[in-house]
Image (tube, rainbow, N blue to C red):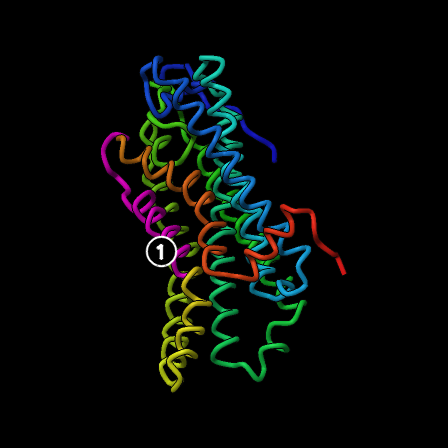
Amino acid sequence: MVLMEPELGANGTAVTEFILLGLVETPELWPFVFVLFFFAYLVSVGGNLGILAAILVEPKLHTPMYFFLGNLSVLDVGCITVTVPAMLGRLLSHRRIISYNACLSQLFFFHLLAGMDCFLLTAMAYDRFLAICRPLTYSTRMSQTVQSTLVAVSWACGISNALTQTIALTTLNFCGSNVINHFYCDLPQLFQLSCSSVQFNELLLFVMCILMAGVPLVLIITSYIHVAAAVLRIRSVEGRKKAFSTCGSHLTVVFLFYGTGIFNYMRLGSEESSDKDKGVGVFNTVINPMLNPLVYSLRNPDVQGALWRVLMGKWSLT
């Protein structure tokens, strides 16, 4: 991706770097924050790579649902890696500066991964819809070709969204304050620093949120309305419980992902950044990726067994 230099403002100066205030501004707390987030990073990356390894080595998990889950684990590793290591580096060096180009790069990759997340979660809902509502045609409707196509579409949509937002941001002038009250670069905080109009950018963000998050969310809800109706027609209580259990983990992840995302991006025109924004940022970039492996393995004996075999080194790729 070719990055552009910031344009000159009306006073002939331009911001070439930003200052990220981080989660806390008290230097005495920085070692505690470093240890906490370093541990969270290790747990998140280890958990998601563990899920990915379990899916790769366990034949029982070679199904469409776990194919999508493996891709989701890769996205979670990417999402936390885009933000947390850079923050840890700034805490170690006591330098809170990030260059304009590095800020744009971080924003691009964050929105790429978040956009892909939306569509992968939708693909997973579609998979559950086919498995429960269309079981007789499931294997043909969710073939390997269809799975690969859905992931490729997720990549295409994520890249389109990230490029659109990043290129639109380069049209703004930054010639005043360069202090970002956050621990990573994101659109709402950068809009507040612009010395040119952000009306178009805010409208674009709103429209892209509808396309990238709103439409997938409607599709997910529609899929689960059909799933719920089909499950309630099952006479066996045990059958209903088993059908709902296969959807519970996915619904939990959808709720966490969309809940924090809506709070963060659908409040256009709000005042200065607050600690609430930082809290939502921590949830988006750290807690969600850390919780996902736990959510998907907690009530799944197949995943638990595969993870145990991976940890013990007892696996077979046959």
Find residue 23 and report its horizontal and vertical position in percent: 35, 25
Q: Residue at x 49, y 52 (%)?
A: 117
Does 134 sit above or below residue 189?
below
In magenta segment, residue 261: yes
Q: Say which element carries label 1.
A: helix
The residue lying toward the viewer, choosing from 220 and 296, is 296
Give the amino acid type for the residue marked by disc 1 in the picture. Phe
Looking at the rendered image, the quarter that the N terminus falls into is: top right
Res. 214 image quadrant: bottom left
- The extreme right residue here reads 318
Find residue 254 and report its horizontal and vertical position in percent: 40, 56
Does 234 sit above or below residue 111?
below
Q: Residue at x 74, y 56 (%)?
A: 316
The residue lying toward the viewer, choosing from 119 and 251, is 251
Find residue 210 and report its horizontal and vertical position in percent: 37, 55
Magenta region, residue range: 251-273
Does 316 sit above or below residue 100?
below
Does 258 sit above or below residue 173?
below
Left or right, 2 with respect to 170, comes to right
Q: Mark 1 points at which residue?
A: 255
Dot 1: within a 10 Å radius of its alpha carbon, few (fewer than 14), some, or many (20 or more) residues? few
